[in-house]
Amino acid sequence: MRSWWRDDTVFEISLQVNGKWKIIRKYGEKTYIASGKYLEVKPPQRLQYTYTMPQFSENEDMITIKIEEKEGGSYFIFEKSGPDIETELAALSENEISESEKGWQQGFDLIGKTYTK
């Protein structure tokens, strides 16, 4: 988690089925909160949880992460579904990248830098 977030970020994580999670980050005068509940925890193959940022929307989206071995390597499959991401994607022009995708990609890039030697 520290590879994605600044040192002053607060984490509350109960990584188990029905466990809740919350990430609190201050950026200037604003406080951002992301939270949800774990629905499926099957290390190392699958993780599924709800995701909401109440300061932007009351809706919950679903995040599903799968790790699959194929042809001698591992593939990380990330899927976000739900009303907020559907609305965001529907508003895009052809070949435009959503703000959600840009944000998640930054996090994935940080993980790659952390674990690549």
Image (cartoon, rainbow, N blue to C red):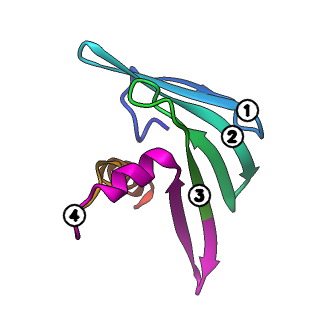
Q: Which residue is mark 4?
A: 93
Q: Nearer the viewer, mark 3 or mark 4?
A: 4
- The reply, left or right, for residue 27 in relation to residue 3 is left
Q: Which corner quadrant of the image does residue 90 belong to?
A: bottom left
| SS category of the residue bearing label 1 | loop
Which residue in the structure is indicated by mark 2? 38
Which sits earlier in the primary sequence, circle 1 or circle 2? 1
> Residue 55 sits in which quadrant?
top left
Circle 1 residue: 19
Mark earlier in primary sequence (4, 1): 1
Foreground mark, 2 or 4, reads: 4
Q: Which class describes the residues within 10 Å of circle 2: few (<14), some (14-19), or many (20+)? A: many
Q: Residue at x 68, y 58 (%)?
A: 46
Asked if marks 1 and 2 touch (Cβ < 8 Å), the reply is: yes
Tell me, yes or no, whether the highlighted magenta stretch contains residue 74: yes
Which amino acid is tagged 3? Ile
